[in-house]
Image (cartoon, helix red, strand yellow):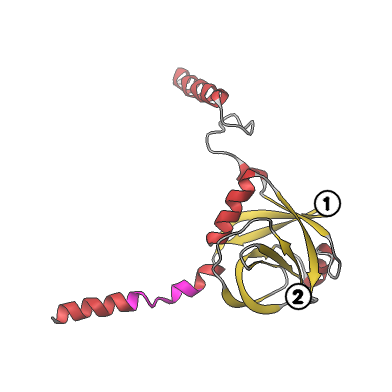
């Protein structure tokens, strides 16, 4: 009986781990690029379902959208598709890249508290530089999200031509036979 109660207590306590609150802040090694008016900046993504789905979508092709300034702290607009959400009450800071309502992206040059899903943070810009890069206060800002070349490599694209096809098989066979012949 005591053993069963201890096991039950252990199960209950293991579900109360504080690690769940830190999931949104865990950085990925994954980077995404944001391009506005020919200027590109990198974004370090956090590791969550939304960013995993976003990376999968960006592996298909870049995403271009029109964003508008709002509230004096962000530019935002529709992604054109939905991502999974894991909203939590947070205070977004300058440089934060946020998912709002599952289908809108917000790029912050100021601060705001709301229930958001964190996607990442624009790397290495001061608040003043962010305001310039994000065209703070303007409307109809064309923004492109895309993955760096190393990230867009396809599994199986041995010859790195951007496609997975029979030429990759031939290249792989040549590599294997060439390695065997040298041994």
Identify the mark nearer the N-term, 2 or 1. 1
Disc 1 is placed on an element classified as loop
Q: Which residue is mark 1?
A: 38
Give the magenta part as a residue range.
13-21
Mark sitting on residue 150: none
Asked whether 87 or 122 is in front, the reply is: 87
Residue 111 in picture, x, y percent from top left: 72, 77
Q: CA distance from mark 2 to mark 1?
A: 23 Å
Q: Which residue is mark 2?
A: 110
Mark 1 nearby-residue class (10 Å; few <14, some 14–19, many ≥20): few
Is residue 74 placed above or below 142 in the rendered structure? below
Q: Residue 161: name its quadrant.
A: top right
Q: Main secondary structure of the magenta part?
A: helix
In this view, which residue lies farthest toward the right? 138
Q: Is residue 54 left or right of residue 182?
A: right
- Which SS class for mark 2? loop
- Give the quadrant of the C terminus: top left
Q: Quadrant of the N terminus?
A: bottom left
Please state the horizontal and vertical placement of residue 154, each as a whole percent of the image: 57, 39
* Of 160 and 146, the residue lying toward us: 146
Q: Nearer the viewer, residue 72 or 127?
A: 72
Q: Is residue 152 magenta?
A: no
Furthest residue in direction top, as rendered: 181
Q: Position of residue 37 (x, y in %)?
A: 84, 54
Would you place residue 159 above or below residue 15 in this image? above
């Amino acid at each position: 009986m005591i053993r069963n109660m201890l096991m039950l207590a252990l199960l209950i306590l293991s579900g109360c781990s504080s690690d769940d609150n830190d999931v949104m802040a865990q950085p990925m090694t994954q980077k995404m690029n944001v391009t506005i008016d020919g200027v590109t900046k990198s974004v370090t993504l956090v590791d969550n379902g939304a960013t995993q789905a976003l990376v999968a979508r960006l592996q298909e092709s870049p995403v271009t959208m029109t964003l508008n300034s709002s509230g004096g702290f962000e530019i935002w607009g529709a992604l054109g598709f939905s991502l999974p959400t894991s909203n939590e009450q947070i205070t977004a800071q300058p440089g934060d890249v946020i998912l709002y309502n599952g289908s809108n992206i917000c790029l912050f040059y100021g601060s705001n508290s709301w229930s958001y899903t964190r996607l990442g943070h624009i790397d290495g810009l001061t608040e003043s530089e962010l305001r310039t890069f994000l065209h703070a206060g303007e409307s109809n800002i064309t923004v492109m999200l895309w993955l760096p070349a190393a990230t867009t490599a396809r599994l199986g694209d041995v010859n790195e031509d951007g496609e997975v096809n029979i030429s990759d098989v031939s290249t792989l066979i040549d590599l294997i036979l060439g390695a065997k012949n040298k041994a």
